[in-house]
């Protein structure tokens, strides 16, 4: 009887977390353009890269198609995605919002871990990073057609593999917020050993490394933040400016010697809020040689249709050139979107409808990301 109750409780908790994900990672269908033969051929012949999805947090078996969320491997292949950056989320406080988030309250990542009887219920942020990196490793082992990008040579390995098997997908491990390192410099080395190759210094709240665009103080880099930035570049970990405070962006760009990324965001010129970038920062990122991933959710582009995403991409390209803009969906990031990754060719059509030529579309869909990774990977 005790075993039966335990099994029933576990099933209830697993079902509850599935319902939670279905509620916070929704697809509310938006108008999609008809995909022309030209768009389909262009999409299929391009190594499409998405700079950000938070799918690891929910511990789904990504090798299986499911009806919830936005990303799994069958849908990535259906959508023609060749490279997916997977972000690690290690702490989210209740009350998190884009305008002002305090580093206090109920830790929702811990709660999710407790509901699923996972290690993240009992460990701190770095332990959660280890857990999600292990989960990615399990998916790579189960699928057999994934290339985990850890060094520059892996980019060529991915290209070669896709030439014979277009279903091959590259994956790159990122982290949202340097608080995951728990203030310990050696944890950056450990994260690198785990396969982390992209790191955002801030997430939704200020931390000992830097201020967040959504934090209370919203300050710049601390001494620890500056030391971490220098060591990231030396190791070969791309610097992600997403969620960083304006002061943090300024100070990071002043120190960065390699191209930076904004893994997921938007432009104030088409959607003005604390989550999007000013023209001044867009110009500074372009001057650094970096790239901005445009998101697919309401706060990023003030809409959820492919045309809304294309409008934001058009704005950035007109301002700083199409060499500095890319895709950064924020799929499975507690976002409501108008299309999932399996419907991505509709975005290629929207880019063509926005007046981009084929070469520009190729750069936006993936070429710009590949250029930056070639400059940052060890």
Image (cartoon, grey):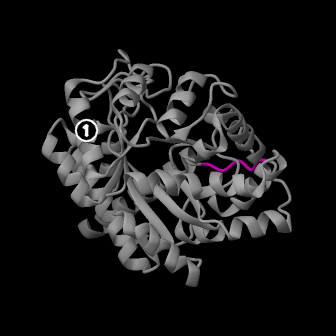
Q: Residue furthest top?
A: 217
The x, y position of residue 197, in whole percent, is 34, 54
Please identify the dominant SS of the magenta region.
Answer: loop
The part of the image, by quadrant, that contains residue 312 is: top right
Q: Secondary structure at mark 1?
A: helix
Q: Nearer the viewer, residue 40 or 280?
A: 280
Residue at 24% x, 52% y is: 191
Magenta residues? 26-30
Task: Locate residue 341: give its quadrant.
Answer: bottom right
Residue 275 visible, this orientation: no
**Would residue 66 be seen by someone viewing this image from the given angle?**
yes
Q: Percent position (x, y) of residue 177?
A: 34, 38
Within the magenta stretch, is there residue 330?
Answer: no
User: Which residue is painted at 37% across and 36% down in the image?
Assistant: 92
Position of residue 42 measured from the top left corner of the image (x, y, whole percent): 74, 65
Query: What residue is rendered at 68% in x and 70% in y?
Result: 45
Q: Quadrant of the N terminus?
A: bottom left
Task: Specify whether 116 is left or right of 20.
Answer: left
Residue beneath disc 1: 230
Q: Is residue 196 left or right of residue 26?
A: left
Q: Position of residue 121 (x, y in %)?
A: 25, 48
- The residue lying at 67 percent from left, 58 percent from top is 362
Question: Can you say which quadrant of the picture contains the C terminus?
Answer: bottom left
Q: Crowding near pointer 1: few (<14 within 10 Å), some, many (20+)?
A: some
Task: Answer whether residue 29 is magenta in the image.
Answer: yes
In depth, the one of 361 and 225 nearer the eye is 361
Looking at the picture, tell me which residue is in the foreground, 237 or 259.
259
Where, by quadrant of the figure, is residue 260 drawn?
top left
* Labels in figure, total: 1
């Amino acid at each position: 009887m005790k075993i039966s109750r335990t099994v029933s409780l576990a099933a209830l908790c697993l079902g509850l977390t599935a319902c939670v994900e279905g509620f916070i990672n929704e697809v509310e269908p938006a108008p999609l353009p008809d995909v022309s033969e030209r768009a389909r051929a262009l999409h299929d012949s391009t190594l499409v890269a998405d700079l950000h999805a938070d799918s690891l947090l929910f511990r789904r078996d990504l090798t299986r198609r499911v009806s919830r969320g936005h990303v799994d491997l069958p849908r990535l292949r259906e959508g023609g995605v060749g490279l997916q950056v997977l972000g690690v989320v290690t702490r989210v406080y209740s009350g998190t919002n884009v305008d002002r988030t305090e580093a206090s309250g109920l830790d929702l990542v811990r709660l999710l871990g407790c509901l699923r009887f996972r290690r993240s219920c009992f460990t701190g942020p770095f332990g959660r990073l280890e857990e999600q990196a292990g989960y990615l490793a399990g998916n790579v082992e189960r699928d057999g057609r994934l290339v985990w990008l850890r060094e520059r040579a892996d980019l060529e390995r991915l290209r070669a593999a896709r030439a014979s098997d277009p279903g091959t997908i590259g994956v790159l491990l990122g982290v949202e917020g340097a608080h995951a390192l728990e203030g310990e410099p050696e944890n950056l080395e450990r994260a690198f050993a785990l396969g982390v190759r992209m790191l955002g210094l801030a997430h939704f709240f200020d931390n000992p490394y830097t201020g967040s665009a959504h934090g209370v103080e919203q300050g710049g880099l601390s001494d620890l933040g500056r030391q971490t930035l220098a060591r990231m570049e030396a190791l070969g970990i791309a610097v992600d400016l997403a969620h960083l405070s304006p002061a943090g962006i300024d100070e990071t760009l002043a120190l960065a010697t390699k191209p930076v990324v904004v893994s997921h965001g938007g432009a104030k010129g088409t959607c003005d809020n604390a989550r999007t970038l000013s023209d001044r920062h867009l110009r500074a990122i372009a001057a650094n040689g970096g790239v901005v991933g445009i998101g697919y959710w309401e706060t990023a582009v003030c809409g959820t249709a492919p045309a809304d995403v294309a409008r934001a991409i058009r704005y950035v390209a007109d301002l700083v050139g199409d060499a500095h803009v890319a895709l950064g969906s924020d799929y499975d990031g507690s976002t409501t979107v108008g299309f999932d990754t399996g419907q991505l060719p509709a975005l290629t059509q929207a880019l063509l409808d926005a007046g981009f030529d084929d070469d520009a579309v190729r750069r936006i869909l993936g070429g710009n990301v590949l250029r930056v990774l070639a400059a940052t990977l060890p």
